[in-house]
Image: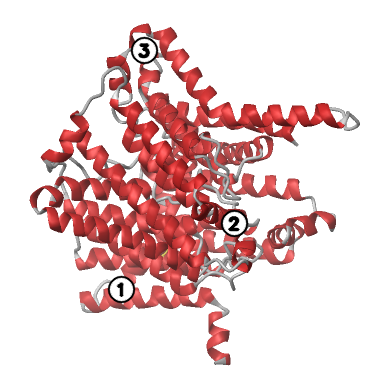
Amino acid sequence: MERSRAVFAKPWLWSFLGALAVWLAAIAFTGGHGGGGMLSAALALAQFTVIVGIGQMFVITLGPGNVDLSLPANIGLASAVAMKVMHGSDSMIAVGLLAALACGAAIGAANYLLIRALRIPPIIATLSASFIIQSADISYGRGLQIKPPPGFADFTNLEVFGIPILAMLTAAFSVVAGIALHRMVYGRSVLAIGQNSRAAWLAGIHVGRTRALTYTLSGALGGIDGALLAGYFRGANVDIGNEYLLASLAVVVIGGTSVAGGKANVPGIWGAALFLVLLLTMLNTFGVSAGVRLLVTGLVIVAVIAAAGGQAAQR
Amino acid sequence: MPVTSARKPAQGATARARLIRAWLPTLSLALVLAAIAWLNPRAISYFGFSLMLNLAIPIVLATIAQLFVISGNELDLSIGSFVSFVGCVTATWLNDAPWLGIATLLAAVCVYAALGALIYLRNLPSIVVTLGMSFVWQGLAILMLPTPGGKAPAWLQGFAAFSFPFVPLPIVAALAIGAIVHFGLMQTSYGAILRGSGGNPAALARAGWSLLKTKVVLFALAGFFGVLSGMALISITTSADANIGSGYTLLAIAGVILGGGEFVGGRVSPFGAVVGALTMALAASPLLTFMKIPPDWQVAANGAILIVVLAARALVSRRED
């Protein structure tokens, strides 16, 4: 009983076990072939979910109702901005990445301003913002498939011993995010606000500043993710970020971060992202139709979240 | 307003702010109508309204579905793909094998009720659960109707073809829906309990009401109105495709919020939501076509309307304090 409770206390362990299970199922189906390739492909796709997942994690940790629904639109716009600024030339890569970062950060800051100025729930604020961002993207991108500079495309697809370079960088960033969350004033402030924002305010924490920073951070991560995605898939498009609404929320929740706020977990995001990507890989190796793939993905996410459960009911 | 002001005038100001707040949804609808009348006077006629509001009823019904979920402090991000799924069932099974179709739609409502129970019992975040369910409904819709097609049952098309003298059908239907939901949710005693489950769940539980039951009832009602929305949509379009309702999730949330609903505290308004849904339905396309806004920016206009109305409400609320 004690032991099982200890395991349940670490829900992120489950996400890695789940990832392992679907990977084994996929390998069993192919008869042991392509297991390694499947893992590198999974890492390459999971890194994009992890980047936005970390941003979403900090936002959700701020407490009930805090969520960034503008990430998909943000990713789409930033991918177009990055590709336009780079304009296919290797010398502009850094500038393009900075532009995507700035675009995302501006969107995040605008989200916070809407929440603050209109005193509306973040869900509605980020949703309304995403309408406008999406239109801006459609109008700005104009269906032009601008190719990334060859150097950038190669870099985002580069692998060393089967491990994508980007995944290593993302892993390094995750470590930094983990340290920021647990050891730095910023992360501790986020956790404190999530546990009780009034108590945090009375304790002298800059609640407004921390929230503004968190939404800006989430936006900036969405922006950089958009640029990297455009490089990896060799072109920006409006729908490039669509799947990251469910994905960013799902990895945060499956990874053991509390939706009620005040409790976050970075390693769980990796486990959950790998789990989701490998689940899709497994379904693809089974050769199921698009309808079945959506159906199973949805059912598995609902089942996993239901099994992991929320916090002890406080209602 | 100075804090030291005498009590009476302050109360008067508060009452006035409340009044403005209550009329804000109607005011925004009137503004949208005025803009249409100014841009194209001929649109303000029986036929003009019939055309402009052609697709309003499914949006109103989806908005009411969302209203029930929001009353209980939850949010349903799957209503759009649920409407798509219902549309696919309506255009295929309900036409070819009515009993199978009816059983499927009833089962779908039961799934909604079960989701309510699951969300309450496991204390789950409704946005993630419903986002996951949106994949499920979408997948089922694609399985049922891989390519656009199907056919609405003849009796259903008869409903859509029905017309009233002097007042276009969508307006009559919207008012009727608003009146029924207003009565059920605002006038009956159990309606008050349902709203209370969002307003102060702890107090309600102490008073001996089952929060599990209220959540199940609210989600079942959402599923029921989602089914009505999908059927109403197919009665107009007469055929379906797997993405037919995809825009409804956002329209429905926007409609509830435009109509004066609050995200927390069970503060909702059925008539307001109907008016909000009509505003969204009008603003979604006809108005923007008249205003010569390029299609690229039509989605943005929806977001902008939402932000403007919320800003106006924030101003009014500040005066209310």
Q: CA distance from mark 1 to mark 2?
A: 34 Å
Q: Which chain is mark 3 on?
A: B
Closer to the eye: label 3 or 2: 3
Closer to the eye: label 1 or 3: 3
Residue drawn at x 20%, y 37% is: B235
Q: On the rendered image, what quadrant is the C terminus of chain B found in?
A: top right
Residue A16 on image: x %, y %? 45, 75
Residue B44: assigned label? 3
Residue A35: assigned label? 1
Mark 1, residues whose alpha carbon is within 10 Å: few (<14), some, or many (≥20)?
Answer: some
> Which element carries disc 1, helix, strand or loop?
helix
Residue A279 on image: x %, y %? 33, 67
The reply to the same-chain question for discs 1 and 2 is: yes
Residue B207: assigned label? none
Residue drawn at x 47%, y 61% is: B215
Closer to the eye: label 1 or 2: 2
The reply to the same-chain question for discs 3 and 2 is: no
Residue A149 on image: x %, y %? 41, 39
Residue type, numbered disc 2: Ile
In which quadrant of the rendered view does residue A194 lie? bottom right
Residue type, numbered disc 3: Ile
Location of mark 2 (residue):
A60
Visible in this render: residue A82? no
Instruction: Relative to A298, say whether B288 is above or below.
Output: above
Residue type, numbered disc 1: Gly
Instruction: Relative to B34, say whether B153 is above or below.
Output: below
> Which element carries disc 2, helix, strand or loop?
helix
